[in-house]
């Protein structure tokens, strides 16, 4: 399997979204992604894994294996789940440095930040921030060892 | 407390040596005061009085009753708050669907509702609900708009379930 860089995956998603000519289609696609996202094991659904700044409850857990960060997440809201599913697809399986340097421009390019109401796009950015925080934490672990 | 913006009546005296700000509240009211809204307040009151508060109430009740009846027909929908003489605000939840998802999909159709805790998180916890969807009707809303809300809700529920 050829592993995509973060930029390549972002470009893929932008391509996929360009196929839809309306937001109805985009949302149905995001909802579909949300329904397909693997459920988060109950042991990860604890308070410290909750993402602050979201209207819905979002749990985000991360593992660090072989120098790479792997994310798992879940939410009680399905559109949020679809959005996290995209974030995981872009960032999971990359090194802390790659994750920290990712500009996540695809979120703007697919029109998400301008289409969502302010409080909701803040929630989306809170998820990205939390993912980067994990990467930063794992990176500093590496230096401690 | 330092000022965050300058200009207008917030200044008392300026010399090369020092600047003295006006007394409170002027110190913190830089620039042109909100004259337009102050002027607009009178026509707004005239408008309300011309229509008449009882007529406004009648119209809001009409919309509320119509919307309540239509909402009750949606499967799994529960109205939160059913006082006899409530204002024309409808708060509800739909089983198996998160309020935020409904809010985003309605927003996409140009239908404005509020979703979430409505600054009443302890009450939401008491009812064990993640929040509600809330539609409010005013004198300028119409029966057709209620129909659009119902149509949007039915479509959103279908996509989300």
Image (tube, rainbow, N blue to C red):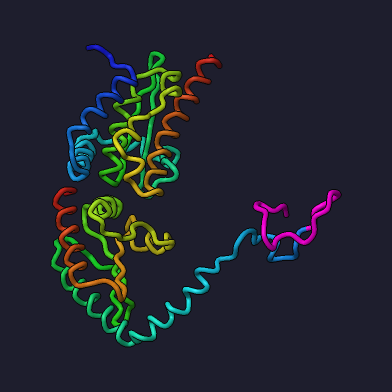
The residue sitting at 44% across, 61% down in the picture is B119
Vertically, is B44 above or below A43? below
Identify the image quadrant of the N terminus of chain A: top left
Q: Residue furthest right?
A: B17
| Figure check: A102 above or below B124 | above
Picture coordinates of residue A86 (x, y %)? 29, 32
Query: Where does the image place residue A39, in percent across and percent down from the top left?
Result: 26, 36
The answer to whether A74 appears left or right of B78 in the picture is right
Verify whether residue B17 appears in magenta: yes
Front residue of B147/A69: it is B147
Figure check: B79 above or below B30 = below
Is B1 on the left-hand or right-hand side of B127?
Answer: right
Magenta region, residue range: B1-20
Q: Quadrant of residue A38?
A: top left
- Residue A4's spot in the image, x, y percent? 29, 16
Work out whether B64 lies above or below A141.
below
Q: Nearer the viewer, residue A125 or A75?
A: A125
Q: Does any portion of residue B81 appear in the rendered image?
A: no
What's the residue at 29%, 27% (across, down)?
A89
């Amino acid at each position: 399997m050829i592993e995509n860089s973060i930029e390549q995956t972002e470009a893929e998603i932008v391509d996929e979204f360009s196929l839809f000519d309306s937001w109805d289609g985009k949302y149905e696609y995001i909802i579909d992604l949300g329904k397909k996202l693997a459920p988060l094991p109950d042991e990860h659904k604890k308070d410290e894994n909750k993402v602050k700044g979201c209207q819905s409850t979002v749990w985000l857990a991360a593992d660090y294996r072989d120098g790479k960060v792997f994310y798992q997440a879940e939410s009680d809201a399905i559109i949020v789940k679809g959005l996290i599913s995209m974030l995981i697809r872009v960032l999971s399986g990359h090194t802390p440095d790659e994750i920290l340097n990712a500009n996540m421009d695809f979120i703007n390019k697919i029109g998400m930040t301008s289409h969502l109401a302010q409080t909701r796009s803040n929630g989306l950015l809170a998820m990205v921030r939390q993912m980067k925080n994990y990467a930063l934490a794992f990176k500093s672990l590496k230096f401690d060892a | 407390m330092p000022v965050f913006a300058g200009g207008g009546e917030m200044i008392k005296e300026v010399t090369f040596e020092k600047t003295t700000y006006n007394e409170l509240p002027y110190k913190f009211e830089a620039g042109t005061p909100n004259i337009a809204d102050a002027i607009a307040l009178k026509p707004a009151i005239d408008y309300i009085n011309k229509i008449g508060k009882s007529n406004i109430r009648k119209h809001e009740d009409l919309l509320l009753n119509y919307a309540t009846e239509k909402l009750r027909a949606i499967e799994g929908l529960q109205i939160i708050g059913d006082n006899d003489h409530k204002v024309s605000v409808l708060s509800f939840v739909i089983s198996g669907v998160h309020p935020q998802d409904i809010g985003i999909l309605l927003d996409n159709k140009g239908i404005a509702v509020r979703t979430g805790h409505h600054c009443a998180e302890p009450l939401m916890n008491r009812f064990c609900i993640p929040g509600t969807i809330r539609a409010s009707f005013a004198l300028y809303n119409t029966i057709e708009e209620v129909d659009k809300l119902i149509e949007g809700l039915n479509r959103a529920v279908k996509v989300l379930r």
